[in-house]
Amino acid sequence: FEPYLTPPEKLPETRGYVIPYGDSPTDDDRIGEMVYLNILNQARRYVYIMTPYLILDDKMATALQFAAQRGVDVRLVLPHIPDKRSAFLLAKSHYAELIGAGVRIFEYTPGFVHAKVFLSDDICGVVSTINLDYRSLYHHFECGAYLYKVDALADIKADFADTMGKSQEITIAEVKKQSLMTRLAGKLLKIAAPLM
């Protein structure tokens, strides 16, 4: 055990902080949601978000829209090929209001995106298990790592650029082309959203 108890002679040069955290449905602390809301509310230049599911409550929808309306470049990267049709239809039901507020939405065309990542202003980010949906934010045990001024943020930004380069940006014109059935299904699914 001695080699493990002896500190190295020289520690590697590092900067910033990596802060792991957990979220539990057994208490009233909504840590995962508060971390996401804090990033959106503190952002000055940009917030990039990658998530497989976009099932928003009013708080999160308002924070996304308000950030975009105050001039922050807010971008969502979502899957173009869903794993769950109902979740995909529900996500699309948010597109018009988000795009109308200035949020840019990208669908990753090669397939499904399962990452849960936030990145803001080259200063902070989150890599986690926490989706932007009710179950993940309120009903599941989840965990994440908050990254502050670490070198890995540049790698995350490069990954976002690569992923957005392989994605289709959704415009309001495309949203208006959605079929009546798609729009109705999305509105009806909002009733069941807390269970999804």
Image (cartoon, rainbow, N blue to C red):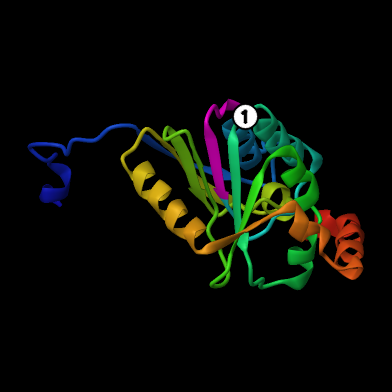
Q: Is residue 91 something one can see in this rendering?
A: no
Confirm whether the magenta stretch covers residue 47: yes
Neighbour class for label 1 at 10 Å: few (<14), some, many (≥20)?
Answer: some
Which residue lies at the image location 31% right of the left edge and 40% below the top edge? 151
Residue 74: quarter of image: top right
Which residue is farthest front?
Answer: 173
Answer with left or right where residue 142 lies relative to residue 178: left
24 left or right, relative to 44: right
Q: Nearer the viewer, residue 171 or 64?
A: 171
Residue range of the region highlighted in magenta in the rendering: 41-49
Give the answer, above or below, for where 110 lies relative to 78: below
The image shows residue 84 at horizontal and vertical percentages of 71, 71
Numbered marks: total: 1
Q: Is residue 128 visible?
A: yes
- Rendered-image quadrant of the C terminus: bottom right
Residue sitting at 79 percent across and 60 percent down?
90
Judging by the rendered image, the residue that carries numbered circle 1 is: 71
Frontmost residue, 40 versus 135 = 40
Residue 79, position as x, y percentages in the image: 61, 64
| Front residue of 51 and 20 | 51
Question: At which x and y percent is residue 148?
Answer: 41, 33
Is 33 magenta? The answer is: no
Residue shown at 54% from the left, 44% from the top: 48
Disc 1 residue type (three-letter)? Gly
Q: Secondary structure at mark 1?
A: loop
Residue 112 in the image, given as x and y percentages of width and height: 58, 69
